Image (cartoon, rainbow, N blue to C red):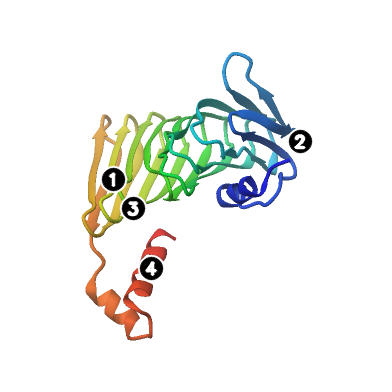
Amino acid sequence: MIDAIQKHLLQEVAGIHEVPQGAYSLRVNGSLSGKQDSENITIVKKEDKPGIDIYIRPGTRNESVHIPVLLSQTGLKELVYNDFHIGADCDVTIVAGCGIHNSGSAESEHSGIHSFYVGKNARVRYIEKHYAEGDGNGKNIMNPATVVEMEEGSHMEMETSQIKGVDSTRRTTNATLAAGATLVVHEKIMTHGDQFAETHFTVDLNGAGCGAHVVSRSVAKDRSRQSFYSDIRGNNRCSGHTECDAIIMDRASVTAIPQIVANHVDASLIHEAAIGKIAGEQLIKLMTLGLTEAEAVEAIINGFLR
């Protein structure tokens, strides 16, 4: 059983109140708390290191698997390895994420390495949310790493978000695409106080006709710092696009370094980056509709990160 704090964390990172139906793996305070297979999805605990292997049978459609991680024990630090083996012709949703509740003075940290092996013509939607809270002064740290290997004709959409409570994070994603594969990434980050967030995307477009679309939207408040790095490499006839949009407020700092490398004459690559403050006319327009300045700022930020 999970307690009230853990139930709240589960709602924040996975959108559910209780242990989910269907295939799932629930990790609580450094240990596997429970898991369940479905007819087409098998979850196996690793024997040599912390983590699990998830095997999704070829042809599996309209199924999902949840793998949330919850930390409510102050001072706990862990590194977990999760591998996803997704068969050909699948159409599945994977819901991950980590929630930390830290009520002490020690650092709490969860770092995860997720590796995806996406089979031919498979379609995957991957949702990852990071959230932290607590009434102590101990820091909450998350350092997720993602490795993606996509076979011919596969499609993967990644939705990652971190909008509250994480003091320090370094997020890395490395992807390799075969012919006709498509990767779409939507990242959302908000930092405040003295928080720090760093993101690295590296995508190798190796196969003919493959493509990647990477979009990061972020808001930096107070004295927080953010860095965004992307490296899209066109090694064949392909298309690639990377975009970083950030709102900067107060005394925050934002760095955006998008890079594109064309190693083939038919590689079509675009990068964009924009950093700026909230426009005064946006605030005035909303305030004329009856909102206070604080409410107008919140409405603009919510719309930007939607």
Q: Which mark is residue 192?
A: 3
Q: Quadrant of the N terminus?
A: top right
Q: Amino acid at mark 3?
A: His
Gap between marks 4 and 1 measured at Cα? 20 Å
Density class for disc 4 (Cα within 10 Å; few <14, some 14-19, many ≥20) is few
Gap between marks 1 and 3 measured at Cα? 10 Å
Q: Which residue is mark 4?
A: 298
**Tags 3 and 2 in contact by the CB under 8 Å rule?**
no
Gap between marks 4 and 3 measured at Cα? 14 Å
Q: Which residue is mark 2?
A: 38
Q: Amino acid at mark 1?
A: Gln
Image position of 272 (left or right of 91):
left
Gap between marks 4 and 2 measured at Cα? 41 Å
| Disc on the earlier residue, 4 or 3 | 3
Question: Which percent across, then down, holds residue 222?
Answer: 27, 55
| Disc on the earlier residue, 1 or 3 | 3
Q: Which residue is mark 1?
A: 226
Gap between marks 3 and 2 measured at Cα? 40 Å
| Disc on the earlier residue, 4 or 2 | 2
**Tags 4 and 2 in contact by the CB under 8 Å rule?**
no
In this rendering, is residue 168 above or below 56?
Answer: below
Q: Secondary structure at mark 4?
A: helix
Residue 189 or residue 61, whichever sits in front: 189
